[in-house]
Image (cartoon, helix red, strand yellow):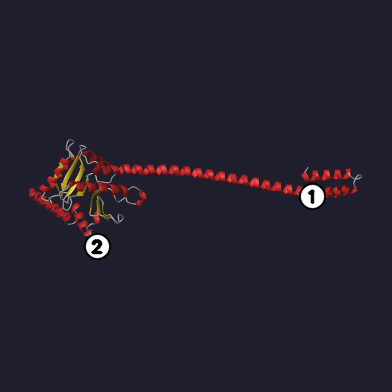
């Protein structure tokens, strides 16, 4: 029973008890009792509505709590996946940096072992050719070729542009880096290409080699960059041009590769000059020497023809 109902009933009882003793109070209390009892249905309705609102509020609160819990779970899941993703990607970056550090160690830790390790990795990864990799001797027409020998050793050769070996310098286990590089200084002097004090520095070529290998490793790091197909089995990088076993490539547009078998098919110098590659002429001149094409190849063909002619003449004379 509600409070209004109980109060109305008590007032009605009081009115009944006073019916003989005091008619006025009995009548007044009776009217009050009737008024209170008339309010009871409204009070009950109000209580029912209030309870309904409370149930709605409770249900809404529970729904909100459930939704928040779901969001919290999703957030935790997302954070968990992000944490996993971050760890995986961080590991991949660390692995790549560890690999490129092998090439950086040529400069940071100059030694026979660091150079051997870099050349082996670059060869195994098909970054450089199995015949080694070259680096220009600064401001000369000579080149150093870094070669892994058949017995597992290391040799640096001083070469002409066409690959003619001027001198060869094996790096023995007991030879200190300073002594070995001094030998390369003397080799350049003996070849008549010494530019003078402070300008005959083979370590510059070694640093160029290290920087090239790091750059190529970064360019080949992702398949979707599209450089792996062209930028492989590199012979040398000179003045912003890569020379591989198959292509001549401008470093600023590696998708534009000139196949070496097409070096003599057209006026590449003029064609590339019109495209804005002003240094293309020097690059193509070096390429034709390096790959022994153009006039060198024609001379070789003529020499081979002459040899065959002499052999045929000898055979005719013997038959007669």
Q: Position of residue 203 (x, y in %)?
A: 19, 46
In the drawing, does residue 108 fall left or right of residue 87? left
Q: Position of residue 165 (x, y in %)?
A: 15, 47
Residue at x-position 50% and y-position 43% = 77
Residue highlighted by disc 2: 273
Q: Secondary structure at mark 1?
A: helix
Name the side, left or right, on which 132 lies relative to 7: left
In what quadrant of the picture does the N terminus appear? top right
In whole angstroms, how far apart are the C-alphas of marks 2 and 1? 103 Å
Seen as rendered, the residue at the extreme top is: 174
Work out whether residue 266 can be spotted: no
**43, 141: nearer the viewer:** 43
| Residue 64 visible in image | yes
Along the viewing direction, whichever of 222 and 318 lies nearer the viewer:
222
Q: Residue 137 at what x, y percent from top left?
A: 17, 50
Q: Quadrant of residue 126?
A: top left
Left or right: 142, with 251 as reference point: left
Q: In what element is the residue under mark 2? A: helix
Marks 2,1: beta carbons within 8 A: no
Q: Nearer the viewer, mark 2 or mark 1?
A: 1
- Where residue 290 appears, x then y in whole percent? 19, 52
Q: Residue furthest right?
A: 20
**Side of 262 relative to 93 (left or right):** left
State whether residue 298 is above or below residue 213. Answer: below
* Pointer 1 local density, CA inside 10 Å: few below 14, some 14–19, many at least 20: some
Along the polypeptide, which appears first: circle 2 or circle 1?
Answer: 1
| Residue at image coords 85%, 47% | 29
Q: Identify the mark at residue 8; answer none if there is no mark.
A: none
The residue at 20%/43% (across/down) is: 147
Q: Which residue is mark 1?
A: 39
Q: Residues within 10 Å of mark 2 (few under 14, many from 20)?
A: few
């Amino acid at each position: 029973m509600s409070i209004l109902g109980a109060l109305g009933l008590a007032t009605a009882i009081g009115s009944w008890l006073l019916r003989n003793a005091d008619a006025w109070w009995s009548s007044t209390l009776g009217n009050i009792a009737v008024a209170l009892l008339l309010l009871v249905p409204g009070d009950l309705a109000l209580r029912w509505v209030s309870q309904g609102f409370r149930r709605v509020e409770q249900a809404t609160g529970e729904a909100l709590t459930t939704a928040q819990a779901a969001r919290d779970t999703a957030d935790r899941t997302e954070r968990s996946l992000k944490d996993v993703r971050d760890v995986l990607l961080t590991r991949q970056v660390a692995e790549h940096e560890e690999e490129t550090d092998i090439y950086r160690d040529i400069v940071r830790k100059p030694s026979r072992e660091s150079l051997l390790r870099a050349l082996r990795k670059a060869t195994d990864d098909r970054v450089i050719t199995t015949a080694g990799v070259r680096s220009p001797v600064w401001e000369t027409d000579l080149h150093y070729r870094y070669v892994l020998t058949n017995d597992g050793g290391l040799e640096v050769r001083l070469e002409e542009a066409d690959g003619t070996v001027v001198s060869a310098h094996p790096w023995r286990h007991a030879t200190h880096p300073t002594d070995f590089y001094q030998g390369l200084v003397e080799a350049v002097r003996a070849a008549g290409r010494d530019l003078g004090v402070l300008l005959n520095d083979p370590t510059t070529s070694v640093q160029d080699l290290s920087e090239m290998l790091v750059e190529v490793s970064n360019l080949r790091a992702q398949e979707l960059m599209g450089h792996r197909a062209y930028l492989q089995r590199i012979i040398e990088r000179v003045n912003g041009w890569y020379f591989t076993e198959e292509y001549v490539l401008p470093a600023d547009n590696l998708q534009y590769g000139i196949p070496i078998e097409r070096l003599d098919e057209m006026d590449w110098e003029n064609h590339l000059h019109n495209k804005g590659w002003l240094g293309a002429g020097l690059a193509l001149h070096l390429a034709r020497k390096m790959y022994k094409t153009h006039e060198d190849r024609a001379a070789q063909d003529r020499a081979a023809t002459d040899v065959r002619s002499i052999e045929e003449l000898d055979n005719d004379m013997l038959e007669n």
